[in-house]
């Protein structure tokens, strides 16, 4: 198992192979030998042997025909594995995962919490065959499509896959089968407040005040629960909203500025470039190319 995971640079538009790649060698799973927050997620099917995965202390044994879905920013480790353990899987970094999910829903903490415990699914033989076909299709799109179309083609296919995961999440949460700890409930309340106020308030102190706690404690809770700071989540939600609006070709950049309530286009562009490595116009061009 690898001791070090390659970090994804924050600046500049990454190539598709940095964001997404298919593997059949478990040495390339984005896991360290100790529990750590993952900058990349992975989705794959066990093709032989067994392993024990642990995600936020939720331990699960994986065996042949089990589908594993571990999204980015999970606190995870492979606690053990048999010598013959094997998987067919793909790795996906957070930037691309967020773009995939932006076409399905706003990424919320309740989905994040759900995926901490619902990350292994046992498939029937026919479902395994369909997943293998899906992997072959992803590989074809990632390697054979014209370069300018590869990323968006892969994203569209991944949305089909993650839509099924999202539907199952909604079914389970709507029937009340998901329960949260006190810290998770606090984090969930924070994220709901961000959803409501992010366009007019992007300071951690504002949300800490609404929750009647200190900014330091709020940041600590968010790091404990999600591995990311409160500020990171505010920025992420803002980015997802901007990206969603940029995908709407009927909106001018000035409309995006108005809707997101940035003081001016220059500040929005500076914010977007700082966190994505590209300008809003470049992102729109890349998305609609």
Image: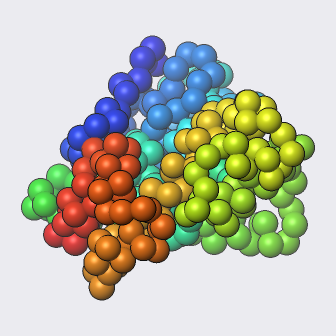
Q: Is residue 157 left or right of residue 141?
A: right
Outermost residue toward the left in this view:
146
Q: Nearer the viewer, residue 156 or 267?
A: 267
As drawn, 127 above or below 255: above
Whether residue 276 is visible here, answered yes or no, is: no
Depicted 30 relative to depicted 254: above or below = above
The image shows residue 111 at horizontal and vertical percentages of 67, 57
Given residues 96 and 190, the one toward you in this image is 190
Residue situated furthest front in the rendering: 263
Q: Residue at x 61, y 56 (%)?
A: 201
Q: How many marks?
A: 0
Question: In the image, 55: left or right of 210?
Answer: left
Residue 232 x, y percent position in the rendering: 55, 42
Q: Quadrant of the C terminus?
A: bottom left
Q: Residue at x 17, y 52 (%)?
A: 143
Residue found 48% across the figure and 67% down from its top: 261
Is 208 rendered above or below residue 244?
above
> x, y (%) of residue 25?
37, 31
Residue 229 appears anywhere in the view: yes
Quarter where residue 195 is shown: bottom right
Along the viewing direction, whichever of 187 and 116 lies nearer the viewer? 187
Quarter of the figure with residue 106: bottom right
The quarter holding residue 279 reads bottom left
- Of 243 and 253, the residue lying toward us: 253
Q: Position of residue 247 (x, y in %)?
A: 34, 73
What colour scheme has been applied to the protein in the rendered image?
rainbow
């Amino acid at each position: 198992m690898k001791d070090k995971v390659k970090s994804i640079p924050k600046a500049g538009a990454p190539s598709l192979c940095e964001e997404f790649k298919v593997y059949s060698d478990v040495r390339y799973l984005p896991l360290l030998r100790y529990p750590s927050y993952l900058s990349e997620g992975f989705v794959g099917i066990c093709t032989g042997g067994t392993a024990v995965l642990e995600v936020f202390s939720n331990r699960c044994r994986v065996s042949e025909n089990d589908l594993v879905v571990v999204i980015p920013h999970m606190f995870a480790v492979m606690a053990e594995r048999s010598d013959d353990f094997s998987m067919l899987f793909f790795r996906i970094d957070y930037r691309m995962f967020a773009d995939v999910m932006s076409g399905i829903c706003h990424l919320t903490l309740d989905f994040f919490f759900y995926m901490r415990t619902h990350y292994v699914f046992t498939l029937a033989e026919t479902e395994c065959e369909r997943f293998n076909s899906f992997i072959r299709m992803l590989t074809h799109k990632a390697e054979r499509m014209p370069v300018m179309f590869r990323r968006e083609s892969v994203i569209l296919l991944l949305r089909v896959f993650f839509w099924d995961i999202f539907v199952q999440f909604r079914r389970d949460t709507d029937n009340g089968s998901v329960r949260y700890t006190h810290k998770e409930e606090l984090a969930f309340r924070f994220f709901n407040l961000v959803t409501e106020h992010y366009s007019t308030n992007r300071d951690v102190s504002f949300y800490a005040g609404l929750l009647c706690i200190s900014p330091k404690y709020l940041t600590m809770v968010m790091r404990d629960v999600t591995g990311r700071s409160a500020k990171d989540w505010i920025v992420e939600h803002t980015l997802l909203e901007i990206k969603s609006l940029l995908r709407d070709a009927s909106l001018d950049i000035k409309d995006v500025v108005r809707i997101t309530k940035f003081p001016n286009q220059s500040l929005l562009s500076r914010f977007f470039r700082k966190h994505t490595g590209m300008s809003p116009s470049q992102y729109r061009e890349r998305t609609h190319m």
